[in-house]
Amino acid sequence: MVAQGFSVDLNKALVFQVGHLGETYEEWVHQPIVTKKGPRFFHSDFWEFLTLTVWWAVPVIWLPVSVWCISMSVSRGLSLPEIVPLIALGIFIWTLIEYTLHRFLFHIKTKSYWLVTHTHTLSIMSHFMYIVLMLMLLWNNFRGNTAHYLIHGCHHKHPMDHLRLVFPPAATAVLCFPFWNLVKLFTTPSVTPALFGGGMLGYVMYDVTHYYLHHAHPTRAVTKNLKKYHLSHHFRIHDKGFGVTSSLWDIVFGTLTKSPKREQ
């Protein structure tokens, strides 16, 4: 694993090594290593522990939050026939957020260690996305290889690392604040909780589905096709196929992954 004279030692903590790869990081991170055991991230046991998340933490933590939000709308006077469409709309909106985050944030191209090297991508990001990125880390820092590896690069390098597949609860909690305030800005006090709760439900479905597609053995046609589609994103064409729970937005925005037969 040599890049610009720098060799990545896979037997040592990786996070502070990958920044040295420079422009070759993009190629390196998309050469997956398929092993059941994930790599070491940090020398510190404390920081290493914070990078590990079991899949069931997502529904255990966030389903109650979703239910609580929906119950707030009930307490504020909305009826069941009014709430159900809001939940469905929240789930639908989440699918677009899922696609947008995956395409424009998780697959941003980096080459510096930490800092911004060029800013053309910022021009195509919406103001809303900019707020989200600022609250995740700092936009400047995210442009670096090191930060990218922490957020999503590690998943492409070690796609079967089962403890670094779902989003850590602390990071999700940070993202909740701008999303909540954005929904609150455009809706009424009674609508906000149900719509947000629906979006949160969509997120839970996404992360659990993502884990399932990597580690389960689907028997139904729908889930088999989803698994095939997502693994194609990992092992064939990483710059297409950004949808995980659905290929809808890939179809809309022209990033649909074609089957090998169709490409021929």
Image (spheres, grey):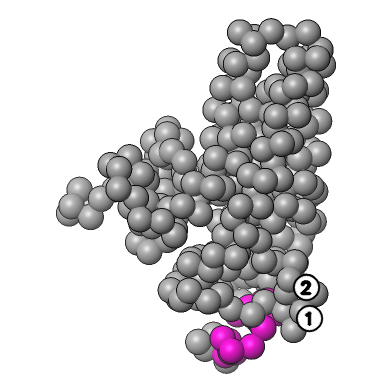
Residue that carries the numbered disc 2 in the rendered image: 47
Q: Is residue 191 above or below residue 243?
A: above
Q: Kindly indicate whether the residue at mark 1 contacts the one at mark 2 (C-beta within 8 angstroms).
A: yes
Q: Which mark is residue 140?
A: none
Residue for point 56% across, 48% down: 207
The magenta region covers: 6-21
Q: Is residue 36 visible?
A: yes
Q: Front-most of 262 and 225?
A: 225
Type of amino acid under label 1: Ser
229 sits left or right of 76 in the view = left
Label 2 Cα neighbours within 10 Å, binned few <14 / some 14-19 / many ≥20: few
Q: Is residue 236 above or below residue 2?
A: above
Residue that carries the numbered disc 1 in the rendered image: 44
What is the quadrant of the C terminus in the image? Answer: bottom left
The residue tagged with tag 1: helix, strand or loop? loop
Q: Front-most of 138 and 221?
A: 221
Residue 211 image position (x, y, % from top left): 51, 54
Q: Tell me the quarter of the picture where residue 252 sits.
A: top left
113 sits left or right of 252 in the view = right
Residue for point 65% across, 14% down: 83
The residue tagged with tag 2: helix, strand or loop? helix
Type of amino acid under label 2: Trp
- Measured in 3D between alpha carbons, the distance from the residue under mark 2 to the one under mark 1, in whole angstroms, is 5 Å
Q: Is residue 117 visible?
A: no
Residue 85 image position (x, y, % from top left): 58, 15
